[in-house]
Image (spheres, rainbow, N blue to C red):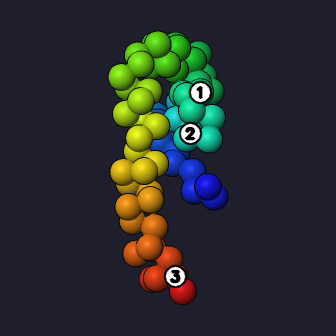
Amino acid sequence: KDIEYIRSYYFNKLEYTRFSSSVGKYVGFTEYGVRNAEYWNNDASDLSAMKAQKEVYCLHNIQNWYSNIL
């Protein structure tokens, strides 16, 4: 439960949208990012796919990462 999946979208080194598994939805940081976040948050299949990425990507690889760090 300490793991968080984050997918950020950048343009010209400025983050405009982010998905965070702890929030469970997209958040926009610019005008363009807010519009994207609203659009993506209304797509139930995209939201469920992004929520599943924590289990698919993070939890699948966590043992490998911890063993390399420790």
Q: Residue 34 at what x, y percent from top left?
A: 57, 18
Q: Quadrant of the N terminus?
A: bottom right
Mark 2 nearby-residue class (10 Å; few <14, some 14–19, many ≥20): some
Residue that sits furthest to the bottom in the current view: 70
Please tell me the numbered disc located at residue 20.
Answer: 2
Q: Quadrant of the C terminus?
A: bottom right
Horizontal placement of 34 versus 53: left or right? right
Q: Which residue is mark 1?
A: 27
In three-dimensional space, the C-alpha distance between marks 1 and 3, rounded to whole angstroms, equals: 31 Å
Q: Residue at x 52, y 14 (%)?
A: 38
| Residue 3 found in image quarter | bottom right
Q: Residue 22 at what x, y percent from top left?
A: 62, 41
In three-dimensional space, the C-alpha distance between marks 3 and 2, rounded to whole angstroms, equals: 24 Å
Please tell me the numbered disc located at residue 69.
Answer: 3
Q: Residue at x 40, y 75 (%)?
A: 64
The kind of secondary structure element at disc 3 is helix
Horizontal placement of 68 versus 22: left or right? left
Q: Residue at x 46, y 82 (%)?
A: 67
Whether residue 12 is visible: no
Mark 1 nearby-residue class (10 Å; few <14, some 14–19, many ≥20): many
Circles 1 and 2 in contact, beta carbons < 8 Å:
yes
Q: Residue 20 at what x, y percent from top left?
A: 56, 39
